[in-house]
Image (cartoon, rainbow, N blue to C red):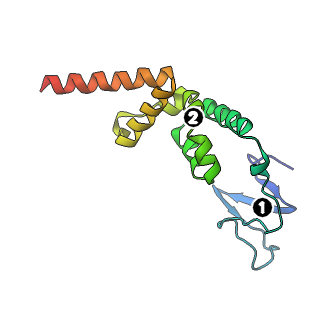
């Protein structure tokens, strides 16, 4: 099996060719199967293994993800996955470990949600978020005093 950076990789016994960023199914795919664009549903009798993991372990994994994230969207995608990950992803320990790369917001992309995210990280004890938020507030005060 080749890695995803290769031109082809195995997907459960079926070979899928990559064309740009889109995945194309091989012509031998059975008609009526999910075309990988929809949500995969778990059969009713199959157990949910995520529920079997203790909260401490999931929090540790989410903290490592936050520390290695390169954009705020990495953390946001966790919140959109399921209700349990949304609740655990909102824990202060995750926001305290957010990486500097995930906190970097360009001036053109600054918005109220970006400020709330930085404030949440700063309240959790993230020093980089405290610094960024202080710099933004200082710049805002300087701009308003110059008018």
- Nearest the eye: 132 or 54: 54
Q: SS at mark 1?
A: strand
130 left or right, relative to 87: left
N-terminal label among 2 and 1 = 1
Residue pictured at 65% horizontal, 66% vertical: 37
Q: Is residue 145 visible?
A: yes
Q: Is residue 78 visible?
A: no
Name the quarter where the C terminus is drawn.
top left
Residue pictured at 85% horizontal, 60% vertical: 12
Residue pictured at 42% horizontal, 20% vertical: 131
Tell me if label 2 and label 1 are in contact, CB under 8 Å: no
Q: Position of residue 90 (x, y in %)?
A: 55, 40
Residue that badge 1 annotates: 16
Residue that badge 2 annotates: 70
80 left or right, relative to 28: left
Answer above or below: position of 53 versus 24.
above
Give the distance between the C-alpha atoms of the residues marked 2 and 1, in whole angstroms. 28 Å
**Mark 1 neighbour density, 10 Å: few (under 14) some (14–19) many (20 or more):** some
**Is label 2 or label 1 in front?**
2
């Amino acid at each position: 099996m080749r890695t995803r950076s290769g031109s082809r990789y195995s997907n459960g016994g079926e070979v899928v060719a990559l064309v740009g960023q889109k995945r194309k199914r091989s012509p031998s795919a059975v008609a009526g199967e999910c075309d990988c664009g929809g949500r995969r549903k778990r059969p009713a009798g199959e157990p949910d293994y995520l529920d079997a993991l203790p909260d401490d372990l999931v929090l540790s994994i989410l903290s490592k993800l936050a520390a290695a994230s390169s954009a705020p969207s990495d953390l946001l995608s966790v919140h959109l996955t399921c209700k349990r990950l949304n609740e655990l992803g909102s824990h202060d320990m995750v926001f305290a470990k957010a990486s500097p790369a995930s906190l970097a917001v360009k001036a053109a992309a600054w918005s109220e949600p970006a400020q709330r995210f930085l404030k949440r990280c700063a309240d959790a004890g993230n020093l980089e978020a405290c610094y960024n938020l202080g710099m933004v507030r200082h710049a805002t005060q300087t701009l308003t005093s110059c008018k």
